[in-house]
Image (tube, rainbow, N blue to C red):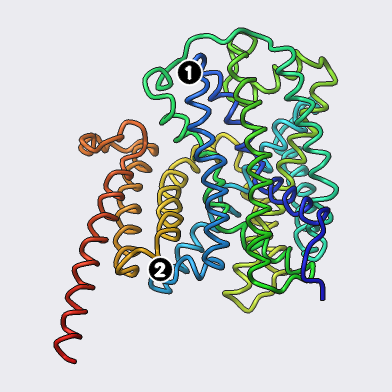
Amino acid sequence: MKKSLSFTDIMALGFMTFAFFLGAGNIIFPPQAGQQAGDHLVPAMFGFLSTGVTLPLVAIIAVAVAGGWKGMTQDLPSKVATLLAVLIFIVIGPAFAAPRAGLVAYEMGVKPFIADAGQLSLTIFSIVFFGIAMFLSRSRGNLVDMVGKFLTPILFIALVALAVSVVANPQDAIEAARGDYIDMPFLKGFVEGYNTLDAVAALLFGMVIVDAVRSKGVTDETATRKYLVMAGLIAAAGLAFVYISLFYLGATSVNIAANASNGGDILAIYVAALFGPAGQMMLSLIVLLACLTTVVGLISACSEYFSSLTSWSYEKWAVVLSVTCCVVANVGLNQLIVLSLPALFALYPIAMALVILTFIRRWLPNPALSYRVVMLVALSFSMIDAAKVAGFNVSAFRVLPLFDYGMAWLMPTFAALVVTYFVGSQKAVKQEQQEGQTV
């Protein structure tokens, strides 16, 4: 039984992880953020990289440290941990992220080549796209080889070609920042990074990566954790490269793409200016491969987890989830993005709180208390941010720090962590005193 991976296997594993993360949101949102950030490009970009790169990497490391989802949630009631996992899987799987990736693939990769694109063309594309994703996700044993060794290198070469062209031939000069990027570019970029969904997905992609490592014959838990971290580092480097190049693309597109309605339009206009008619073909290749590999990862992660909760097999769940994604995708891209925003603002703080608690657990005097209170506070205040994004009037909570920037959860969650630490310490001291008196 093989107990170690070759350099080629490690790189393939890292490329697979990178490909799983690089999907619809990763390509669409950075150009728009870069265009609005303007001369405040650097702090805005670092804010975006915090939630788009650093947090996913830290989340994968947390999964490795805890030994999986069960280890991360061991101090929560089992039913609560399961419910949280199910909700996350539904959001990043059949409800939002996976159908969104399919819709972006259609809108940017196929629709421009169809003269009279309508609902029928979207339906046909959805069936073909999610059918391919289902086939790839069902072949678990060959997942690393198919995605890491074949699909991702093609995707990465296309992205490198785009990045080099943008740096060598920027289409506009960088102009002044706009909107919230004027006063607090870092925080605005930080919140925009929510759109990638990567920090949440990282908690669950870890399961797929572990399964891929074990399919190569690695059984040692320490080695598995090591390879998981290495895969995360490779993926983080790739994502940082993509985000930085797309941010710069957006920042140098103010005039050429002045009328663009979203990041996808900015990217399409810019690529057409750089490469002419051939540019659309290259962009289509990038988008189709990025979205396909992400959907494969999402379906695999969801199928793996749901099969562990039910009597249905992994293969059956892969089929059901693929069909569900195909149906949801026919709702339309704009509507799906609007519906997904409140879910993002509700889930991200919970994911971040869980990751932080995982790393500091060993120093918590009463882990069960800290986990339950901190997670409850993060959930409660993240719902305020989610309600605001959904259009509800929550102006009564404007007194909360960072409320205007969609981060009303941050200070209350930190305060809950500090309070539970000292309360837990006092309880631990009292318990020691009682045990000493008993002896």
Give the label on residue 293, or none.
Answer: none
How far from the left and from the top, in percent, is residue 110? 77, 33
Residue drawn at point x = 54 percent, y = 45 percent = 197
Tell me the quadrant of the picture where the N terminus can be found: bottom right
Specify the farthest residue to the left.
437
How far from the left and from the top, in percent, is residue 83? 45, 66
Lateral position of residue 195 relative to residue 139, left or right: left
Residue drawn at point x = 80 percent, y = 21 percent = 279
Lateral position of residue 13 relative to residue 402, left or right: right
Compared to residue 23, the image places residue 210 above or below, namely below
Label 1 amino acid?
A: His
Specify the farthest residue to the bottom.
439
Using a 10 Å C-alpha cutoff, classify the residue at mark 2 as few (fewer than 14 neighbours), some (14 to 19) or many (20 or more).
few
The answer to which of 60 and 270 lies nearer the viewer is 60
Label 2 amino acid?
A: Val
Q: Nearer the viewer, mark 2 or mark 1?
A: 1
Among the 4 quarters of the image, the one containing residue 224: bottom right
Compared to residue 199, the image places residue 163 above or below, namely above
Residue drawn at point x = 19 percent, y = 68 percent = 426
Q: Secondary structure at mark 1?
A: helix
How far from the left and from the top, in percent, is residue 3? 77, 71
Lateral position of residue 261 relative to residue 134, left or right: left
Compared to residue 171, the image places residue 139 above or below, namely below
Q: Which residue does the numbered mark 1 point to in the structure image?
A: 40
Compute the Cα span from label 2 to label 1.
41 Å
Tell me the quadrant of the picture where the C terminus can be found: bottom left
Among the 4 quarters of the image, the one containing residue 135: bottom right
Using a 10 Å C-alpha cutoff, classify the residue at mark 1 as few (fewer than 14 neighbours), some (14 to 19) or many (20 or more).
many
Q: Earlier in the sequence, mark 2 or mark 1?
A: 1
Residue drawn at point x = 26 percent, y = 61 percent = 421
Give the label on residue 80, or none.
Answer: 2
